[in-house]
Amino acid sequence: MRRLLLPLMTFGAMLAAPVALADGEALFNSKPCVACHAVDNKLVGPSLKEVAAKYDGEEGAVATVAGHIKNGISGLWGPIPMPANQVTDDEATQLAEWVLSLK
């Protein structure tokens, strides 16, 4: 039984990853983020792909981006500040993981 547990858990995690990414996109589309951000194009704020590129390979990137989403940020991408968003810590993390997965 133990020999089956780890492979089954690994397989389950692999199946869940695309669902989590799709959930990140659905969450993004359900929040006011879409008013200022797009996946491929700069609107008021940077494109999400620009954000992913900026933090690519950076240790702690998920926590950093999640903090920016939840608490807002000013001056990093230009003069227009990003306000804090009404998201839970889990939602901010889910959004950050999704954004950082975009290439």
Image (cartoon, helix red, strand yellow):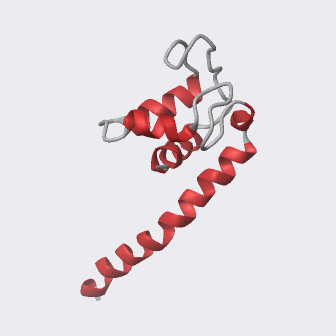
Residue appearing at x 29%, y 89% in the figure: 1
x then y, percent, for residue 102: 49, 49
Q: Is residue 23 above or below residue 60?
A: below
Count of numbered marks: 0
Q: Residue furthest bottom?
A: 1
Residue appearing at x 29%, y 77% in the figure: 6
Residue appearing at x 34%, y 35% in the figure: 60
9 to the left or right of 28: left
Q: In which quarter of the image is residue 21?
A: bottom right
56 to the left or right of 22: left
Q: Quadrant of residue 34?
A: top right
71 to the left or right of 15: right
Viewer-proximal residue among 86 and 31: 31
x then y, percent, for residue 10: 35, 73
Q: Residue furthest left?
A: 3
Viewer-proximal residue among 42 and 72: 42
x then y, percent, for residue 7: 31, 80
64 to the left or right of 57: right
x then y, percent, for residue 47: 58, 36
Residue appearing at x 48%, y 64% in the figure: 17
